[in-house]
Each structure stands twice: as C-alpha cells, then as structure tokens.
Image (tube, grey):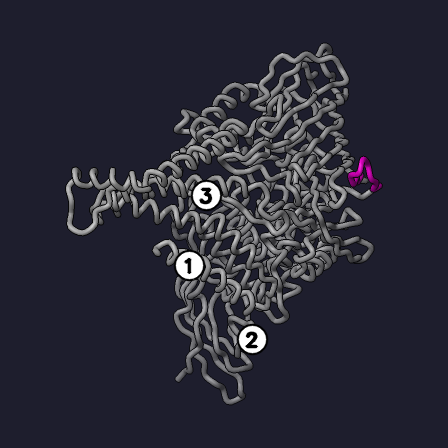
C-alpha cells in the first residue's frame, strides 16, 4: 500500500506535465514514453527504498533508530560518491544515470537501467524479507522469541522469497560486474587521478620536444550506427617548422571519452582501439604506452626544417556491454558526433593534466596556472585550439547507414552508395583550424538561401519549432557581421542537431552541431517578451565564424575574451536589432546575475577580462556586459571600426597569434582621451559600482513640461582576485534616465531623457526638465555598469510640492 501510494506521485506528475504541455500549446503527448521512464527508473527506485526502509525498521524495532540508520545510509552513499567510490554494486538504491533523447531514444542506457533496477529491488526486498522474519506484531518480544518466529516464517514461504531475491541479486549483480568491470575498465576516481599524475610526471619533461605541425588531413570515417561502432583512417601531413631538426616524434592519442579510464588499447575491450600508425620515412618505436595514449618514435634520419612527414593512421571505436560510469555516446544509433580528438596528434598535451589545485594537492603536485601569462612570449606560438597545428587543408569522406546523412565541415563534393552504405565527400576550399567533427543521423533538412549563402538545418522532423528563429538569426548575423566585421568566408551555413548527451552548440567551419536540448523544441511566439534562446545561440555560434575561425588567440590568458566574449557581444547586438532594447536589457540582466554568481563560486581566483583564463562566467557573462558598455561609451561605428581593424590585421594569421593586448590596442585607437579610463576599468581591472537612486520628484510647469529633482548615491569599487573590494575616487560618466508611461514589454517605460553625467561625488543632486509626465527615474537605469544591487538604480517618481 505504501509503495502504491508513493508510486502515484510520478504518475500524477506525468499527467500534470501533459496538462502544462497542453496549456502551452504543445500537443505531442507521449504517454507510453512517460510510462517507460516511470517503470524503468522511478518506480523501481521507490519500491527499493520503501522495501529497504521497512526492512530496516522491522529489524531494529525502534522507529527513531530506524530513521537514523536510513538517513545515515543515504549520507554515507553521498560521502562515498564524493570520495570517488561510486560503483553501483555497493551504492544500493542509487539509480544509474541515463539520458533519454528524442533523436536516439533510450540509446545504450536501457540494459544497464533494467539490470540495476532488478539488482536494487531484489537487494532491498531481501532486506525487507529479513525484516519480516523478525517483525514484531503486537507487544514487544525479545530476540529469542523473534528468532523462533523467524524460523517459523522461514519455513512458511519467507525462505523461498529470500532465496529468490538472493538469486536475482547474484544474477543481476554478476551481469552488472561482467559488463562494468570485465567488458569495460572500472577504476576508482582516486586511482584514475594517480594514473594521470604518473602520466604527467613521466611525459611533462618532454613538453618542449620539437614536433612537426599538421598542415593537411584527409580523413575517412565509417559509421556503423546499428552497433554503435566507427572506424576512421587516413593520411595526414605534417611539416617541421622548427629551427631544429625533429629526431623524436611524440605521438599523442587524446581521448575525448567522458571517463579517464576509457583508454586507447591494442584491442577494443575498452572501446577505443588503434589499428595502425605508419610513416612515410623510417622510424623505430622506442616507447609504447598505448593505455595512456603515448608513443615515441625515433627517426632514422631526423626531419629537417621544412621537410614534411606523412602519417597513415587507423582507429576504431566499438564498445562492449555497459560501463559503471558515463557512456561514451559519441557514436550512437541515431545521432553520432565525433570530433578531431580521435585523430592522432603530436607533442605533450598539457590539457590532460590534473587541473584542480585541490586535486593536485592531494596527489602531491604543485598548483598549476590555468593558462600561460598574458605577456609570456610562448602564448603567441600556438593558438588555444591546437598545439600541433595552425591552419590545415581538410578533406573528409564519411559513410554511414543508408537511411542516415553524414556531415563534416566543407562542401559536398560527391555522394554515392558503397556496399549498401551511404557515403559523402566534403572538401574545404580554404585552410581551417585543426578543429573539425563528423555527424550522422536520420535527418530532415530545411533549406533556404540568403544573399547567395545556402542555409541548412538538419533536424528531427518533430523538432521544427525553433527553425524560424534559427534561420532568422542566421540571416541577421550574416548581414550584420559581414557588413561590419569582414565578409563571411563560406558559401554555406549549416546547423546540425545532435542528441542531448551534451547540452551545447559548437562552431566548426560553416558547420554548427547544436544539441536538441538547447533550442530545437523552443518556440518563440509572436509578442513573447522572453529571450529567444534559439535565436541567440544561433547568432552566437555564427559569430564564431569570425571570432575563432577568422581570428583566434594565442594559447594563454585573454584568448577567450575575443573568441567567446566577442561572440556573445555580437549575438547580443543582432538580437537587440531584431527584438529591441528591452530584450537586450533583459539579457544583460541575466548576464549580470550569471557573472555575480560565477565570481561567488570561483575556486581559484577572479581575474580581469583581459586576463581571463577560460572562465565562462568572465568571458561569456562579463564579456557581453563589458563589450556592450564599451559600445555605449564610444559608439557603435567606432566599436565596429576597431573590430574591423583587428580582423584585418589578424585574420587567418599565426604564429605569432594575437593576444588580448592587440584587441585592446584597437579599442584605444578609437577611444577619446576622456574615456580612456573606461578601457582600464572594463578590461584591466575588476570594477564595480554601487549606484542607488534616493528620490525622484516631479513638478509640472506652466508650459506643460515637467521639472524633475533627482538625488542619487554613487560609489566606485575595485576588486582583487580573492573577492575583496576597496572604494576609489570616482570621476565617471554614467547614464541618468527619466522615463514615462510603461507600455507592454517595457520595464522602465518610454525614455523621456537619457544622458551621460560626470559623477564626482558620493551624493549627486540634479534638476532636469522633460516634455512628458515622468513615472520612473534613476542612475544607470539600463544596468550597463556592473552593480551588485542593480534593482535600486531607479525608483518611481513622486509628485513634488
């Protein structure tokens, strides 16, 4: 009865969800799917927990002791997980994670979910059965009587139930162990950390070993979606651009798998396998550490400066069973998405090191800077995307199931059928970063053309809600970026949906993989005042065709300021032009909240935007705030003039690669001397404002206009890397605004007067005149400055005496 009562909750939640869907105009109900989700995961967990709790309470026969044991167990499971002990065979009652995708359904998760459900339910029913054996009915009984009653109950059926539960526990537990520990490698988190530490200590001394640079990749990719397998092979060409000859080749096989224990092997028992690695010149294998993705070769004749090397490689991915931890879903039955990390590279990969200082400390490793210092000359030697390549030529042939479409960056050169499989060849007509991906799924394709550029969206047929927003953002972005930054480099722009195993969109050259979870089922209705997420994300990823795929920064501090920061700002600009200032202000407020939360969660140190160390809350949230504020100070044309000049000098260049100082120099050229302080405040220091409007009073004049008496407080503060702030003198230009009647969608009202005023005192009094009745007024009303309490910047206007 308890189980049935609790089980009604997820069922009721499903019905409530359908009612909410209907209220929002979404009528694609999937009751069978909801039933599957409840039956496979939620209901077994509820049954297991109820059985465990009842069994424990029956055994201890003390209500509060039973409560304490159950609560202590759940605390223990959480502690064990945090300590890295997360094997599900001893995490009883803890469900395995799974992700349901519209594109790929249950994917590989269902077998593990069913096995774990059987294991947990049987184990907890075994506890409940043991509790039943010693259950006290009526007055309290001693252990002798309880044991005697337990033997009687054992003979009258409880023994059979306990035996059946034990058999299911052993069978399901054995199946789980075979999959998680034998077919797949299982390593406790601390053991994995020690393995990464050993890798770092062994190979970091080779980080400065001269290596050739990849200049061309010709790739063949064969997907076998029906068995979640893939094979890839091909030649790539590298050139020695060092002053010294290369006598030792450091081959790196970086794993993009979600678990550090999913290593490369000579066989496929952990999924990834290297089948061959052959060079066009004599080389001897002198060190083979395939599980850690490292091989060292010694050339018979060193590779001289300017000489080239061709490498023929072949790898495959073919998983067996299911793991204890996260699945590698890069290859899926419907919705594969593999990137360039599966292709061999050269040199020590610093990104594979333990990055968190706390983790490094407990492994007796020194703290590690997140990125090289901004002014370190080494920053300009590599771009932040790749340490073994600059710009490459790219040609990929990809084959897949006959009912799927496979896409890679480049232009479709030909399509054909080979052994019953569908094949495509894509070729880029200009150099690109060594950053590419291949996708495959059953797609519907929506096509449009805009000023000679082909727009394509590859998507699930049912996921068509956001297409108008995506296509409009593509057109608006192509127009604005092309007119104000530089011409778009390509003849096409493609958006490709992939399963929600990851929740991002990612920009490759003219090709944007876009998760189904961040926009494809989003519908922006006419008149909606909420942020059009699909529009913004599309505009952001399109902006990367300039900010990353035309200009990319060196591998050090500040590099993401102009890749992610400028992409965020560019998308905000086109969204503002499409949806108006109110939409932009709403977005900026969300960005401000995100920045303030992010700095509150900072675990190492906050740095100014110019020195950002790939910290999302700085380069995304603060970046959009900073660039928007700068545009407001110097004007849109001057802003675009600086960005055009920056692209003109650095597009498709490197090494040397640009840094944030090069971008800042362009801004300095277009910023008047009176506003140079703004550049320092926004980019080189951590600056906050505390603006508050104390009062606003209005009096109607005989001529019909209105006098407004405004009093506000202003403070300027500088922050350090630890979050401490100090007040500094203020002599800043800040917006003062007065607003009239509000109309639909407006937060402040119609602007009657907005002008910049130079603030030099903590308390400022202004007397202003407007043409219509004022309703609201304040300082920095649009929250362009970073203020930790922006809600008090404006206040309602009161009637004057």
The tag earlier along the polypeptide, 2 or 3, is 3
Which residue is label 1 attached to?
9
The tag earlier along the polypeptide, 2 or 1, is 1
Residue 117: give its label. Answer: 3
Crowding at dot 2, Cα within 10 Å, few <14 / some 14-19 / many 20+, comes out as few
Crowding at dot 3, Cα within 10 Å, few <14 / some 14-19 / many 20+, comes out as many
Q: Dot 3: what SS?
A: helix
* 399 over 2 or under it: above or below: above
Indicate whether residue 419 is drawn in magenta: yes
In percent of the image, x 56 and y 22: which residue is there? 291
- Magenta stretch, residue numbers: 413-425
Left or right, 546 with respect to 268, comes to right
Q: Position of residue 101 (x, y in %)?
A: 59, 49
Asked whether the residues under the numbered discs 3 and 1 touch, taking CB atoms below 8 Å apart as contact, a structural biologist would say: no
Crowding at dot 1, Cα within 10 Å, few <14 / some 14-19 / many 20+, comes out as few
Locate the C terminus by quadrant. Answer: bottom left
Indicate whether residue 82 is drawn in magenta: no
Quarter of the image for residue 59 reads top left
Which residue is label 2 attached to?
744
């Amino acid at each position: 009865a308890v189980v049935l009562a609790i089980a009604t909750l997820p069922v009721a939640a499903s019905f409530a969800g359908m009612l909410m869907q209907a209220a929002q105009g979404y009528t694609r109900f999937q009751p069978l799917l909801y039933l599957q989700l409840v039956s496979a995961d939620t209901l077994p967990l509820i049954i297991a927990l109820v059985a465990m709790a009842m069994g424990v309470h029956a055994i201890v026969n003390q209500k509060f002791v039973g409560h304490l044991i159950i609560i202590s167990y759940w605390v223990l499971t959480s502690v064990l997980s945090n300590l890295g002990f997360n094997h599900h065979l001893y995490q009883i009652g803890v469900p395995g994670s799974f992700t349901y995708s519209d594109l790929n359904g249950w994917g590989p998760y269902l077998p593990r979910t069913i096995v774990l459900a059987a294991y947990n339910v049987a184990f907890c029913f075994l506890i409940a059965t043991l509790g039943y054996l010693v259950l006290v009915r009526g007055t309290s009984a001693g252990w002798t009587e309880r044991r005697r009653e337990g033997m009687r109950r054992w003979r009258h059926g409880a023994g059979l139930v306990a035996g059946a539960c034990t058999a299911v526990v052993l069978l399901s537990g054995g199946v789980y162990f075979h999959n998680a520990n034998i077919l797949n490698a299982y390593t406790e988190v601390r053991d994995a950390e020690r393995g990464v530490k050993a890798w770092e200590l062994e190979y970091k001394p080779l980080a400065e070993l001269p290596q050739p640079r990849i200049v061309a990749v010709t790739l063949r990719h064969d997907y076998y979606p029906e068995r979640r397998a893939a094979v890839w092979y091909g030649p790539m060409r590298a050139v020695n651009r060092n002053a010294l000859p290369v006598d030792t080749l450091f081959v790196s096989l970086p794993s993009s798998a979600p678990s550090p224990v999913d290593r490369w092997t000579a066989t496929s028992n952990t999924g990834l396998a290297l089948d061959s690695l052959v060079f066009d010149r004599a080389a001897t294998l002198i060190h083979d550490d395939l599980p850690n993705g490292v091989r060292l070769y010694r050339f018979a004749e060193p590779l001289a400066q300017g000489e080239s090397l061709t490498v023929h490689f072949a790898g495959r991915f073919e998983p067996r069973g299911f793991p204890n931890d996260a699945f590698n879903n890069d290859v899926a039955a419907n919705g594969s998405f593999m990137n360039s990390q599966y292709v061999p590279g050269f040199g020590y990969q610093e990104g594979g090191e333990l990055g968190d200082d706390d983790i490094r400390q407990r492994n007796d490793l020194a703290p590690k800077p997140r990125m090289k210092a901004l002014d370190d000359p080494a920053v300009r030697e590599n771009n932040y995307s790749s340490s073994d390549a600059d710009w490459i030529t790219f040609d990929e042939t990809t084959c897949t199931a006959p009912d799927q479409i496979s896409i890679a960056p480049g232009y479709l050169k030909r399509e054909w059928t080979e052994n019953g499989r569908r094949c495509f060849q894509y070729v880029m007509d200009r150099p690109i970063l060594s950053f590419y991906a291949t996708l495959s799924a059953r797609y519907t394709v929506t096509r449009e053309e805009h000023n000679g550029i082909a727009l394509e969206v590859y998507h699930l047929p049912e996921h068509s809600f956001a297409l108008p927003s995506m296509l409009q953002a593509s057109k608006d972005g192509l127009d604005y970026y092309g007119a104000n930054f530089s011409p778009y480099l390509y003849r096409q722009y493609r958006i490709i949906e992939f399963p929600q195993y990851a929740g991002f969109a990612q920009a490759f050259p003219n090709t944007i993989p876009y998760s189904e979870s961040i926009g494809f089922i989003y519908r922006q209705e006419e008149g909606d005042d909420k942020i059009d997420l699909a529009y913004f994300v599309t505009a952001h990823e399109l902006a990367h065709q300039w900010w990353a795929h035309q200009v990319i920064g060196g591998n050090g501090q500040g590099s993401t300021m102009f890749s992610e920061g400028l992409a965020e700002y560019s998308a905000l600009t086109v969204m503002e032009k499409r949806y108006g200032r109110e939409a932009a202000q709403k977005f900026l407020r969300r960005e401000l909240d995100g920045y303030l939360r992010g700095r509150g969660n900072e675990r190492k140190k906050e740095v100014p935007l110019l020195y950002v160390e790939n910290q999302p809350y700085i380069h995304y949230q603060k970046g959009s705030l900073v660039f928007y504020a700068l545009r407001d100070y110097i004007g849109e044309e001057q802003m675009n003039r600086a960005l055009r000049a920056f692209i003109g000098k650095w597009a498709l260049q490197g090494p040397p690669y640009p840094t944030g100082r090069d971008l800042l120099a362009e801004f300095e050229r277009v910023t008047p001397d009176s506003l140079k302080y703004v550049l320092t405040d926004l980019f080189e220091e951590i600056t906050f404002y505390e603006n508050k409007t104390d009062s606003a009073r209005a009096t109607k004049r005989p001529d019909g206009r209105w006098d407004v008496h405004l009093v506000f407080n202003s403070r300027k503060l500088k922050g350090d890397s630890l979050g401490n702030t100090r007040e500094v003198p203020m002599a800043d230009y800040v917006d003062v605004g007065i607003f009239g009647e509000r109309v639909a969608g407006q937060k402040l009202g119609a602007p009657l007067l907005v002008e910049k005023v130079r603030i030099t005192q903590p308390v400022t009094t202004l007397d202003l005149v407007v043409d219509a009745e004022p309703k609201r007024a304040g300082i920095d009303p649009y929250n362009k400055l970073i203020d930790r309490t922006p809600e008090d910047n404006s206040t309602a206007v009161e009637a004057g005496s």
